[in-house]
Image: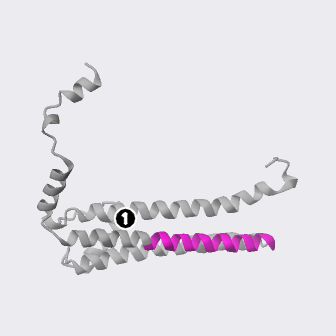
Amino acid sequence: MSLFERIANLPGLHNLPSFSTLFSEINTDMGNSEIWFVLLLACFMLTLHGVAVLMIAGTFHWLDSRLENKRVYGANFLSYFIAILLIIASHLLEIVAWSYICVALQVFPTNPQTFYFAGEMYTTVGYGDYTLSEQWRILPIIISFSGIFAVSMSGAAMYSMMGALLGRSNKNPKSGSGF
């Protein structure tokens, strides 16, 4: 039996709901109109994170080109280190922002528990054993997606900055590498 035949013979295949039915059922199950506000906040935070990372990387590349012309090579690595610290700080600020959002929504009874939850979901560690009410079951998915995409943006920026630092050694005409 081929793979397609096995898929065609799955018992629930012919009872699959349409996307609009599935979406409607999930929306009804959550019973929470505040979740749309949380989704908008997640999009807003990702936009701010993207702008912040672009500004950090842009400043690094500008400073790197200025320092390269002056042959101040140690300062380039210092500026890269500062850029990394700024990116880490932006992630910590986002975890704190998610904590405040969860406190405002009264997801958990205590502030420390809310902070740990936000941090674990943002970093997708998932270590804690949290019991969420029905209306907030989708919250970990939203926080996790925002963390995954924010870390991806940061990684791309750090990759471009490291490439600028490491690419400089290939520009040396005395190296004989031909690059």
x 68%, y 62%: residue: 164
Q: Measuring from the top left, give residue 51's x and y in whole percent.
A: 50, 72
Residue where numbered disc 1 is placed? 146
Q: How many marks?
A: 1
Residue placed most toward the observer, 35 or 89:
35
Residue 66 counted in the magenta span: yes
- Residue 28, given in percent of the width and then of the height, sits at 11, 61
Splitting the image into 4 quarters, where does residue 137 fall?
A: bottom left
Q: In the figure, 89 relative to 27: above or below?
A: below
Give the x, y percent position of residue 70: 81, 74
Q: Residue at x 27, y 71 (%)?
A: 38
Of helix, strand and loop, which one carries label 1? helix
Give the camera-side residue of 71 and 112.
71
In the image, the segment drawn in magenta is 48-71
Picture coordinates of residue 168 (x, y %)?
Answer: 75, 60
Instruction: Residue 21: say if magenta.
Output: no
Is residue 105 found left or right of 179 in the rendered image? left
Residue appearing at x 80%, y 71% in the figure: 69
Q: Report if residue 28 is visible in the image.
A: yes
Left of 124 or right of it: where is 105?
left
Viewed as shown, does residue 57 lie left or right of 47? Answer: right
The amino acid at mark 1 is Ser
